């Protein structure tokens, strides 16, 4: 990983960025991060958060934050809001979503029956595509064997499962953050991202962001990514000095400086 100051970045027009522990810091959105989103927008650099957070949260982000759009639930959809109109692009129709919700309800039953101490996440009611099982946000932390068992239950039902720092998220369908990023660029920004790497960048913090780190030529990690370095096959090309939101603000300031 090269240091951030070696990133030229003068032609970057779009920034895709993870939210938790990248834009946020210890579960909060610091004023400096929020201010940086406004500064980037004012300079003509458009930000698109890419997150595992649920549809309900993303609705608010698309409306309230100074962003071009938001990709949520690990790539299941994007929302963009402009001229008093909310545009919602879903990976599946509402009929397919209803079918998948029924299948996820069976997994939920199985997990709660077989893994004592696990709970459905507090933000589940905001979700449209995945089932999030809490193993340490609002419940006492579970052991790693219990977490692995939750993952196995999802997989036995034919679902994908991904472990974050607080939840196991599981869903049906072959999509991820990167595939929806490519859709967003094609549908909303009017370019094929494969041939336009110079104008885009991605900033993230953890193994969940590996596909994005690997694909984007201008991929940037905030410093906390170093904690996962040994577990990751694909690392960001550039690294910030600051962790979490401090890193995001450092990255934004670097882009603004190079643009001037
Ligand atoms: Mg994160």
Image: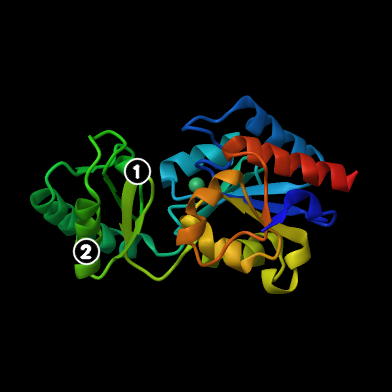
Residue 41, picture quadrant:
top right
- The reply to whether residue 92 is in sight is yes
64 left or right of 38?
left
The one of 260 and 191 positioned closer to us in this rendering: 260
Image vertical order of residue 222 relative to residue 110, above or below: above
Q: Residue furthest right?
A: 260
Spatial separation of the CA atoms under disc 2 and disc 1: 17 Å
> Which mark, residue 166?
1
Looking at the rendered image, the quarter that the C terminus falls into is: top right
> Does mark 2's beta carbon lie closer than 8 Å to ligand 1?
no
- Coordinates of residue 252 in the picture (x, y in percent): 73, 42
Q: Residue at x 78, y 55 (%)?
A: 7
123 left or right of 152?
right
- Coordinates of residue 9 in the picture (x, y in percent): 80, 55
The one of 126 and 30 positioned closer to us in this rendering: 30
Image vertical order of residue 189 relative to residue 174, above or below: above
The one of 179 and 128 positioned closer to us in this rendering: 179
Q: Residue at x 65, y 60 (%)?
A: 188
Image vertical order of residue 15 relative to residue 57, above or below: below
Q: Residues within 10 Å of mark 1 (few under 14, many from 20)?
A: some
- Coordinates of residue 23 in the picture (x, y in percent): 58, 39
Q: Residue furthest top?
A: 31
Residue 149, picture quadrant:
bottom left
- Coordinates of residue 50 in the picture (x, y in percent): 54, 52
């Amino acid at each position: 990983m090269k240091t951030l100051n070696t990133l030229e970045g003068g032609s970057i027009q779009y920034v895709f960025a993870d939210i938790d522990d990248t834009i946020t810091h210890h579960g909060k959105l610091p004023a400096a991060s929020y201010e940086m989103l406004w500064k980037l927008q004012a300079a003509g650099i458009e930000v698109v958060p890419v997150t595992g957070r649920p549809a309900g949260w993303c609705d608010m982000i698309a409306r309230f934050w100074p962003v071009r759009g938001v990709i949520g639930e690990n790539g299941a959809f994007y929302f963009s809001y402009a001229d008093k109109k909310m545009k919602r692009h879903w990976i599946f129709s509402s009929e397919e979503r209803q079918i998948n919700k029924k299948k996820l309800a069976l997994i939920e039953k199985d997990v709660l029956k077989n893994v004592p101490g696990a709970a459905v996440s507090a933000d589940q009611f905001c979700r449209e595509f995945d089932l999030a099982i809490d193993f340490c946000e609002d419940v006492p932390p579970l052991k790693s064997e219990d977490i692995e068992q939750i993952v196995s239950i999802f997989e036995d039902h034919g679902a994908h499962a991904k472990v974050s720092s607080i939840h196991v998220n599981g869903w049906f369908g072959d999509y991820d953050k990167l595939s929806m990023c490519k859709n967003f660029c094609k549908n909303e920004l009017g370019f094929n991202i494969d041939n336009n790497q110079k104008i885009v960048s991605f900033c993230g913090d953890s193994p969940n962001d590996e596909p994005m780190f690997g694909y984007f030529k201008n991929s940037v990690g905030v410093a906390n990514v170093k904690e996962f370095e040994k577990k990751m096959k694909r690392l960001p090309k550039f690294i910030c000095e600051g962790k979490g939101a401090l890193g995001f603000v450092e990255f934004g300031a670097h882009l603004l400086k190079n643009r001037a």
